[in-house]
Image (spheres, rainbow, N blue to C red):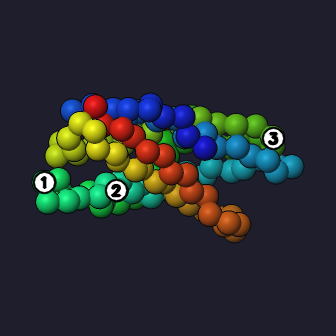
């Protein structure tokens, strides 16, 4: 799950909060730290360049070795807004979490739109 701004300037980066829940009955080990894929997408047309990028990252879990059963951890994530994005366009950001040592049940994916101002 994410907390993100509703809109963002094309000269700024969207600072978001990635919220990881552990609904299991035991601790969720964060060693090694999970990776995630962040994708940015915006349709292009005759006057606007399309955006279709993806990048792999790793969460910074050094201060947190595990998420206790039933608990939540919040990680700050940054999505750069391409300079080519003009006001009024929408940038869709998608991220997919990759948890080492755990079987992926269903997609651990969240998507949110950002309106460029």
Q: CA distance from mark 2 to mark 1?
A: 16 Å
> Do residues under tags 1 and 3 come within 8 Å of each other at their CB atoms?
no
Q: Where's the N terminus, which quadrant? A: top right
Q: Position of residue 46 (x, y in %)?
A: 14, 60
The label shown at residue 41 is 2
Could you tell me which secondary element the residue under label 2 belongs to? strand
State which quarter of the image contains the C terminus. Answer: top left
Q: Is residue 109 left or right of residue 12?
A: right
Q: Earlier in the sequence, mark 1 or mark 3?
A: 1
What is the x, y in percent for residue 76?
48, 35
The answer to which image quadrant residue 116 occupies is top left
Residue at which label 3 appears: 70
Residue 104 location (% of width, % of height) = 66, 66
The answer to whether residue 77 is left or right of residue 80 is right
Residue that badge 1 annotates:
47
Mark 2–mark 1 CB contact (< 8 Å): no
């Amino acid at each position: 799950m994410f907390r993100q701004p509703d809109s963002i300037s094309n000269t700024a980066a969207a600072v978001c909060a990635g919220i990881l829940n552990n609904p299991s009955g035991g601790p969720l080990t964060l060693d090694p730290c999970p990776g995630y894929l962040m994708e940015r997408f915006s349709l292009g047309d005759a006057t606007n360049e399309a955006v279709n990028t993806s990048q792999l990252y790793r969460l910074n879990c050094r201060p947190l070795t595990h998420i206790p059963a039933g608990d939540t951890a919040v990680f700050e994530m940054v999505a750069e807004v391409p300079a080519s994005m003009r006001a009024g366009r929408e940038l869709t950001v998608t991220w997919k979490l990759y948890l080492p040592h755990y079987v992926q049940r269903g997609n651990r994916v969240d998507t949110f739109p950002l309106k460029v101002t």
